[in-house]
Structures are given as C-alpha cells and as structure tokens.
Amino acid sequence: MKIALYQGPGHINNIPAAFGHMEARAREAKAQGADLLILPEMYLSGYNIGPEAALAQAITAEDLAPARQIARETGVRVVSDLYTHSPSPADGPAPTYLDMIRYNTLAIVEALR
C-alpha cells in the first residue's frame, strides 16, 4: 500500500473549494500510485478562522459526502480530519494526547477498510 501525505493550504472559509482541492490532490496521489491520501487537521475549513466561522462550518458525517464521492471516483481513500497539532476541546473526540493518537489511528484504519 502506498500512502500520500498532503501538508499544505486548503481554502479557508470555503468548504466547496476545499473539496475541489481535495479532489485534485486525490487525483495527483492516484497518478503517483497511492491508495490512501492523508490531509492535515482542519483541512476543509482552515486554521485560525475564529470561533464563529468554526461553528458555522461544523461538518457532519453527511457533509462529508463529497469526500466519499472523491474516494469512489479516484480509488484513493481520503482521511481529512486528523488532529495534528493539538487535541480537540475537552468535550470533543480527542481531548487528550492519548485520545488524539487513538482517534487518528482509528481514522486511518477505518479509511483502509
């Protein structure tokens, strides 16, 4: 299995454009023989967008339908919600560093299924 990592900017405060960018990265990854593409934390919304924008752009499982479509069309599994710099808020899915490692590992394992 070949894994592609993308560490770079997405489209801040423009989730539809971020999905377009995700598709382009997935197609590039596939062209290089990758089976899995891992994108950085907060890839879809961007960093430091402020609490109001973050709440307005909260993404549900249903909102990730474009990512699933990209994976189907390109044949590259996509992981786009890893925690890379810090844990989640206390009431989030990865409130401690150990939880962050577990969350990230599970996200990658699930993408490989």
Image: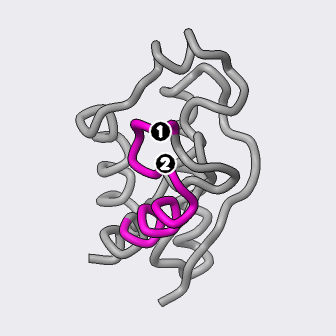
- 47 in relation to 99, above or below: above
Q: Is residue 9 left or right of residue 11?
A: right
Q: Which image quadrant for residue 53?
A: top right
Which residue is the site of mark 2? 95
**Number of other residues with Cα within 10 Å of mark 2, as a class: few under 14, some 14 to 19, many 20 or more:** some
Q: Amino acid at mark 1?
A: Ala
Contact (Cβ within 8 Å) of mark 2 with mark 1: yes
Which residue is the site of mark 1? 90
Q: Earlier in the sequence, mark 2 or mark 1?
A: 1
- Region of the chain picked out in magenta, as a range: 89-106
The number of numbered badges drawn on the structure is: 2
**Number of other residues with Cα within 10 Å of mark 1, as a class: few under 14, some 14 to 19, many 20 or more:** few
Query: Is residue 93 in the magenta section?
Result: yes
Q: Amino acid at mark 2?
A: Pro
| Nearer the observer, 83 or 78 | 83
Which residue is situated farthest in the top direction here? 52
> Gap in Å between the C-alphas at discs 2 and 1?
5 Å
Which residue is situated farthest in the right direction here? 8
User: Residue 49 placed where, x, y %?
Assistant: 68, 20
| Nearer the observer, 82 or 25 | 82
User: Which residue is drawn at the image coordinates 58% and 40% (left, top)?
Assistant: 42
Secondary structure category for the residue under label 1: loop
User: Residue 12 placed where, x, y %?
Assistant: 67, 26
User: Which residue is drawn at the image coordinates 40% and 36% (left, top)?
Assistant: 91
Q: Quadrant of the C terminus?
A: bottom left
User: Residue 43 placed where, x, y %?
Assistant: 59, 42
Q: Which mark is residue 20?
A: none
User: Residue 21 placed where, x, y %?
Assistant: 59, 42
- 46 in relation to 42, above or below: above
- 54 in relation to 87, above or below: above
- 8 in relation to 36, above or below: above
Query: Is residue 101 in the magenta section?
Result: yes
